[in-house]
Amino acid sequence: MRFRILAAGLLVSCASTLTQVASGSDFELEPGRTVQLAGTGVRVTFLEVVSDSRCPVDVVCVTAGDAEVRLSVVGEGEDRTVSLHTMQEPRSVTIGAVRLELTGLVPSPRSTVTIRPQEYRATIRWSTDRARISPASPRAKPRSSRRSNQVRSKGASVRGSRVQ
C-alpha cells in the first residue's frame, strides 16, 4: 500500500515539473527527458539515438552521413514513437496540429572518441498549425474567409497558382 502511494506521488510530482516549451522555439533534449508543448496536451520524450553514421569532424568524408533519433509523442489522442533524421528524410513529422523538426544533434562525432548514449542532445523545433486543430477543441481558431487560389483547367486543379 505504501508503495502505491509513493509511486502515485512520484508520478504527480514528475508530471507537474515538466518544462513547458513555447511554439516556434527550439528546445534541447537529453535521452529520457520529456517536455510539454505549451498550449497543447502533447509531451515529447527523447528516447534514443538509433544510429549515428555522421562524418567525424576530424575526418574528410565523401558523404555527410546521417543520425536517427527516436522520440515518443504522447497527448491529444496520440501515442506514437517517431524517428527523425539529421540528413535523410524524414527530418520532421506532423502529428495532428503539431509539427516537430530535428534541427541538430550534438556532440559531433570524432574519429577517436566513442559517444556514450547519455551524452547526446537533440535540438527540436516545434510549431503548431492552428488550421489543423479540430473544431471541437477549445483552442480551435476559426478558419479565415480568404478565397482559395484554385484554378480549374480541363479537369485539373492547381492550388496556390495564378494563371495570367
Image (tube, helix red, strand yellow):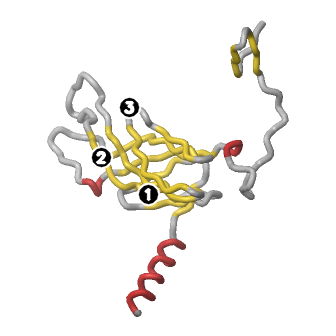
Picture quadrant of residue 5? bottom left
- Name of the residue lying farthest toward the right: 145
Which residue is painted at 37% across and 51% down in the image?
A: 121
Residue pointed to by mark 2: 50
Observer-nearest of 146 and 30: 146
Three-letter code, disc 3: Gln
Which residue is painted at 74% across and 58% down in the image?
A: 138
Q: In this view, does 147 lie to the left or right of 132?
A: right
The answer to the question of whether label 2 and label 1 lie on touching residues, with beta carbons closer than 8 A, is: no
**Position of residue 83 measured from the top left corner of the image (x, y, whole percent):** 40, 44
**Position of residue 14 measured from the top left corner of the image (x, y, whole percent):** 47, 73
Number of the label disc, if any, that sits on residue 65: none
The answer to the question of whether label 3 and label 1 lie on touching residues, with beta carbons closer than 8 A, is: no
Observer-nearest of 154 and 66: 154
User: In the structure shown, which secondary structural element does the residue marked by tag 3 occupy?
Assistant: loop
Residue 111 vs 10, above or below: the answer is above
- Name of the residue lying farthest toward the left: 112
Q: Please state, as top left, top right, bottom left or bottom right, where the N terminus lies in the image.
A: bottom left
Residue pointed to by mark 3: 88
> Which sits earlier in the primary sequence, circle 2 or circle 1?
1
Picture quadrant of residue 119? bottom left
